[in-house]
């Protein structure tokens, strides 16, 4: 029974702890709020420890662990990764933040244990899927990733409910977005690149957001004409966010916007995740396209009801941990999501949440 620590006991972190516990791991869950941590209805076998990681994480808390999994806000990523480096344990996280991932990569240089950032939905599963599809072509022209985590029953002008980190959401709406355009690796503005697309008869809008490509721009630099990632929302969402972030300049006062959204926009357990990975290129001299598309709903899974964002995010990092424990992916240094075989991922007990329901 491998011992692991999960840092952060929010909706995703607590789901990770539960899934790993049901999967036979010995889990310790860390959070800075003792009262909240002790109020969580979790299986008895999950240990709970209070630690204010914003003030630093004592590497001794990780001694003897197989891995530490960070489900904390992106600005605490470096703190957990540094503690993992000192303790000599494997490190996994869910961050979409580009700058903190660069720091994790630097820590991974020469390490005898693995640093595997961006193990969620996007980046994460969609990175694995895109790399697999790209391998089916002799020459690649375009790689387009589209992902939305949405309420099933939108009831406000934003067409949105809070299903994951509000801080992370705001960050991806503000920070510059990596892309490859006309064969050149560049940064494009968040909230731009608007397009409309339909999936299963539902109309969505999609626009640039940061972090969703993970390391794909580096991997495919010089190999594709176009590579981009866009977030999917119900129509009208982007325009309202532009008013808030640009016209009202709340991009300069993120804490105020976070407070507004947290106060006004309810969460929901009735959500869905919709994703589309589209690759075009040449195969045997002919121009071809392959698409991997999924719509995933909240459902019962491994001992409890899980929202779609919990299934796709917590399930994803748990699948990567499993593959690491089984020796099926690299176990030292920096590990990209592209280093994870899609077939192994989908056959995993956690990764099967992404299997086609057709």
Image (cartoon, rainbow, N blue to C red):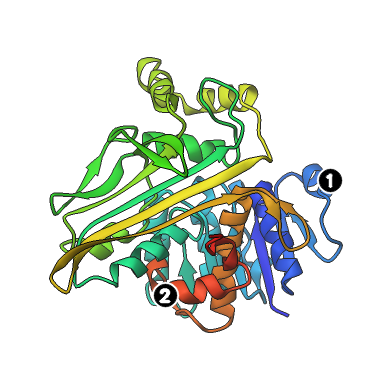
Q: Position of 256 compared to 30: left or right?
A: left
- Asked whether the viewer can see residue 62, the reply is yes
**Tag in front: 2 or 1:** 1
Q: How many marks?
A: 2
From what the image shows, is residue 208 above or below residue 80?
A: above
Tell me where residue 24 appears, x and y as whole percent. 74, 74
Q: Position of 309 compared to 158: left or right?
A: right
Question: Residue at 54% across / 64% down in the picture?
Answer: 355
Label 1 belongs to which residue? 39
| Label 2 crowd bin: few (<14), some (14–19), many (20+), radius 10 Å | some
Label 2 belongs to which residue? 333
Q: Nearer the viewer, residue 88 or 316?
A: 316
Q: What numbered label is drawn on residue 217? A: none
- Asked whether the viewer can see residue 124, the reply is no
Q: Position of 163 compared to 111: left or right?
A: right
Q: Which image quarter is the N terminus in?
A: bottom right
From what the image shows, is residue 292 above or below residue 271?
A: below
């Amino acid at each position: 029974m491998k011992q692991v620590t999960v840092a952060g006991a929010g909706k995703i972190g607590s789901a990770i702890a539960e899934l790993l516990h049901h999967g036979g791991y010995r889990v310790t869950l860390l959070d800075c709020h003792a009262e909240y941590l002790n109020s969580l209805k979790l299986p008895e076998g999950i240990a709970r420890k209070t630690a204010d990681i914003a003030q630093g994480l004592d590497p001794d808390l990780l001694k003897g662990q197989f891995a530490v999994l960070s489900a904390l806000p992106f600005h605490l990523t470096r703190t957990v990764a540094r503690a993992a480096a000192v303790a000599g344990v494997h490190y996994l996280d869910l961050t979409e933040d580009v700058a903190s991932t660069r720091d994790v990569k630097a820590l991974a240089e020469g390490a005898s244990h693995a640093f595997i950032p961006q193990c969620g939905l996007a980046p994460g599963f969609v990175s694995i899927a895109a790399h697999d599809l790209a391998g089916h072509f002799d020459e690649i022209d375009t790689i387009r990733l589209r992902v939305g985590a949405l309420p099933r029953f939108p009831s406000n002008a934003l067409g949105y409910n809070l299903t994951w980190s509000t801080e992370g959401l705001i960050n991806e709406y503000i920070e510059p977005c990596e892309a490859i355009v006309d064969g050149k690796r560049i940064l494009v503005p968040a909230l731009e690149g608007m397009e409309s697309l339909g999936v299963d008869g539902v109309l969505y809008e999609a626009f640039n957001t940061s972090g969703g490509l993970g390391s794909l721009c580096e991997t495919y630099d010089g190999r594709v004409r176009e590579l981009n990632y866009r977030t999917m929302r119900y129509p009208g969402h982007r325009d309202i966010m532009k008013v808030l972030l640009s016209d009202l300049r709340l991009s300069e006062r993120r804490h105020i916007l976070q407070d507004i959204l947290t106060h006004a926009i309810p969460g929901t357990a009735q959500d869905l995740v919709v994703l589309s990975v589209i690759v075009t290129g040449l195969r045997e001299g002919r121009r071809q396209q392959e698409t991997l598309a999924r719509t995933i709903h909240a459902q019962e899974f491994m001992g409890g009801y899980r929202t779609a964002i919990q299934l796709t995010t917590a399930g994803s990092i748990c699948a990567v941990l499993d593959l690491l424990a089984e020796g099926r992916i690299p176990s030292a240094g920096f590990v990209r999501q592209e280093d994870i075989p899609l077939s192994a991922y989908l056959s995993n007990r956690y990764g099967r949440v992404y299997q086609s329901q057709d």
